[in-house]
Image (cartoon, helix red, strand yellow):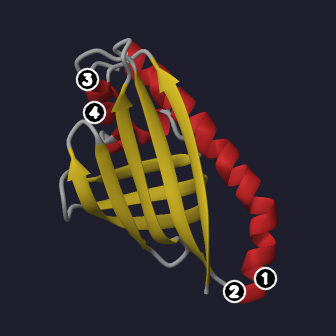
Amino acid sequence: MSRVAVHAEASGPASAERVFAVLTDWPRHDEWMPFTRAEGGRGHGAEVRGWTGVGPLGFLDTMVITDWRPGRRVAVRHTGRVVRGEAWFRVEPLPDGGSRIVWAELVELPLGPLGRAGWLVAGPVVRAFMGLGLRRLSRLAARSVGGVR
């Protein structure tokens, strides 16, 4: 089985604590990550379930939180049939009061050589959507106050 790494990052004016709060408010995931909705718990050991797709076409992404540092970092282990591997988000405060968020994935590719060949096409698309999602998350956190949408 091959593993591939992909990451994206974005910066914005919201505090690290605010970005982390919106990031880990799983039902709000669809507000910033295209084609994805999620639900789940918070804290080490909690389960998270995400659905990526359009309508009935997509896949379930099950995860377990493996690291939880409020306001700064959340890591998961992907445990589903389609997506397996590890991922983490790190939110860093910036001197101007804003924050930088980094999202990294280490994904196990299925199907041997066919999976690696598919990643040549899918990888850049995944990276682009990750970057788009983080920019949207940053804007959402900047305009969201006290959990009000």
In x, y percent, where is residue 56?
Answer: 59, 59
Q: Is residue 15 left or right of residue 129?
A: left
Of residues 18 and 147, the one nearer the viewer is 18
Residue 20, placed above or below residue 12: below
Whether residue 57 is visible here, answered yes or no, is no
In x, y percent, where is residue 30?
Answer: 47, 39
Residue 109, placed above or below residue 76: below
The kind of residue tagged 3 is: Gly
Q: Check whether the beta carbons of the residues at disc 4 and disc 3 lie within 8 A of each other.
A: yes
Which quadrant does the C terminus fall into?
top left
**Disc 4 designates what residue?**
21
**Disc 1 designates what residue?**
114
Q: Check whether the beta carbons of the residues at disc 2 and disc 1 lie within 8 A of each other.
A: yes
Residue at figure coordinates x 30%, y 39% from the top left: 25
Crowd class of label 1 (few under 14; some 14 to 19; many from 20; radius 10 Å)? few
Which callout, 4 or 3, points at the residue further toward the start of the chain? Answer: 4
Which callout, 4 or 1, points at the residue further toward the start of the chain? Answer: 4
**Disc 2 designates what residue?**
111
Residue 60, placed above or below residue 43: below
Residue at figure coordinates x 55%, y 74% from the top left: 82
Q: Which tag is nearer the camera, tag 4 or tag 3?
A: 4
**Disc 3 designates what residue?**
147
- How far, Cα to Cα, is label 4 from label 1? 38 Å
The disc at residue 73 is none
The kind of residue tagged 1 is: Leu
The kind of residue tagged 4 is: Ala
Q: Check whether the beta carbons of the residues at disc 3 and disc 1 lie within 8 A of each other.
A: no
Residue at figure coordinates x 28%, y 18% from the top left: 148
Residue at figure coordinates x 50%, y 34% from the top left: 32
Q: Check whether the beta carbons of the residues at disc 3 and disc 2 lie within 8 A of each other.
A: no
Q: Secondary structure at mark 4?
A: helix
- How far, Cα to Cα, is label 3 from label 2? 42 Å
